[in-house]
Structures are given as C-alpha cells and as structure tokens.
Amino acid sequence: MKKKKIKISDVVILAILILSAIVCIFPIWNTVCISFSDRTAVNQGAVGFWPVNFTVAAYKSMMSDGLFWRSFGGSVMRVAVGTILNIVMCITMGYPLSKSPKQFKGKKMYIWFLIFTMLFNGGMVPTYILIKNLGLLNNFWSLILPTAVPVFNVILIMNFFKTVPAALEESAFLDGANPWQVMWKIYVPLSKPSIATVTLFSVVNHWNSFMDGKLYITDKAKMPLQTYIQSLSASVSVNDMTTLTAEQLNDKMSMSSLSFNSAKALVAIVPLLIIYPFLQKYFVKGIVIGAVKE
C-alpha cells in the first residue's frame, strides 16, 4: 500500500489555518483572562494568556443584581417567541413563493415587494413613531413584531423549498392531502437544514439585538439582557453607597471598567456558543442549498 505523499501546499494551508485560528481565539481568551483579573493588573496591562490576581468580582457584581436575572429571563423569552414567530412566517411565506408563476399568480409582484422592503425600510424614527402610536412602548411585543418577517430568511426557505421534488407534492395531492398538509408534512421535514440555519440566524439576531431595547424600553425591569448590561457600570455611584452591601461595594471597587466590560461580553456570547454546536451540522448545507436558484 502506497503512502500518501504530503504536499507542501497542504502544509502551507494547514499552517495558515492554525495561525488564523490562533489569531481569532487569542482576543477571546484574553477577554476571558481580563474578566477574571483585578483592577491593578488590568490597569497596568499585565494580563496576557492567564488571569492575574484571580477574582470573580466582575461576575459577582453583575449576577448579584436581581434585574440582571430578570432581563436574562426576558431575553430567553424573546428568543423563544421571536424565533418561533420568525420560523412560522418564513415557512408560510416561503412555500407559496416557491411555486411557479402559473401556480401562484402575482408571485413576481410579491417577490419584488419583499426585495424592496429588504433594501429600503422606513428607518429608525418612523418605526419609533409607529410603535409609540400603537401603544407598544415598554411592551414585550415592541421587540418582536418589527422583525417578525425576516425577508432574507424567507428567501433562503423559498429557494430550499424549490429543491423539493414536485413528484412528492403531486403524489400527496393524489392521496387527498391539502396544501397545508403538504407544506407541514412533506416540505418542512425535508427542509431541516434550511430551517436550522434560519433558526440560528433568528436566535442570534434576537439575542444580540441591543438598539430596539434602547429605543422602545425605558423601564429597566423590562429591558432585554443586551440593553440592560450595557447600562451597568463598574464605577461606584452615590446611589450605590446607600443600596449596596459592604461586600458588593468591595467587589465593585476591586474591578476595573475593562474587567467589567469583558465579563459583560462573555455573558452575552456564552448562550450562543452553547446553542451553535447543535445546529452547526445543518448550517453549511442550509446556506448552500438555500442559495441555489432553479
């Protein structure tokens, strides 16, 4: 049996990939180290590949706040409700739009309308005025409804549905199935890669969304996590002197703003790092097939 020769080009590519991975991972690892280091070490720039004067003060200060957990729960609820709504809207819009113009009259008009809304939108001020006039300020649904129909995801689902063999649909109709049954019992089960990809996009979008919470929510108890943690500060205010315990004050004074900001960044990305591995195997397949046009 012949041994496979190692090509120089393969070695170079592998070296480049390893170097790229290190370049990408180092800033994240350095952020982890800074979040677990004390004020003196961080301010001196002494933190590198390992925490200096290990402390969890930044995390204790953040998580000892009752509003933190309330905003965390609110964000989880937003992700769950928003993602389910996004998926339902994408599927119910993508299925009819995947049909030929003969099967769905006016298809081209709807397609162009969707593309127009993707390229041009009302903007921040008109959207705020609309939300205000609907009485949705400081309301959970102000974070969900403006992004209920993600057009890019609709197009991905639509193009994936086009790859489903028409013979399956015709056979189902001959057996007495109606369009709703065909969509949910044939198209949806066959479209798991595309739906998983769209689900990942929706989860990331809802979890990372910051500006809408800043615009529409003024009550801290109703803020999503990303908006709430941005409002937290490592500096000790006059209000903190009267509301915090001696231990909490000591923790807050022992950490720097950079440590606190690093901890906030890690808290924000950890849930996504937990979810991604479960959907990763579908991700590439969903993107590739969803991008193919007939």
Image: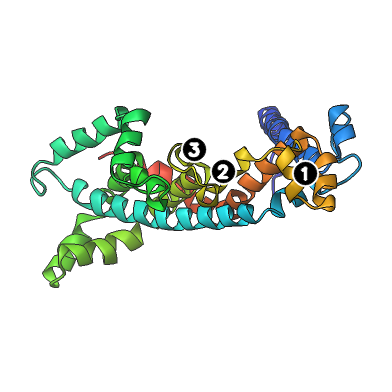
Identify the residue under disc 1.
241
* Above-or-below relation of 58 to 88: above
Q: Nearer the viewer, mark 2 or mark 1?
A: 1
Q: How far apart are the two marked residues, 3 and 2, measured between alpha carbons?
A: 9 Å
Report the amino acid beneath label 2: Gln
Identify the element where label 2 is drawn. helix
What residue does disc 2 label? 226
Label 3 SS: helix
Q: Residues within 10 Å of mark 1 (few under 14, many from 20)?
A: few
Residue 82 image position (x, y, % from top left): 40, 53
Separation of disc 2 and disc 1 at Cα?
25 Å
Q: For the residue labelled by badge 1, is the local secondary structure a helix, a strand or a loop? A: helix
Depth check, front residue: 287 or 261:
261
Q: Which residue is mark 3?
A: 214
Earlier in the chain: of badge 2 and badge 1, it is 2
Q: Are marks 3 and 1 in contact (CB under 8 Å)?
A: no
* x 74%, y 38%: residue: 238
> Measuring 61% from the left and 50% from the top, which residue is drawn there?
273
Decide which of tag 3 and tag 1 comes sooner along the chain.
3
Tell whether label 2 touches label 3 (CB within 8 Å): no
Q: CA distance from mark 3 to mark 1?
A: 27 Å
Residue 227 sits in which quadrant?
top right
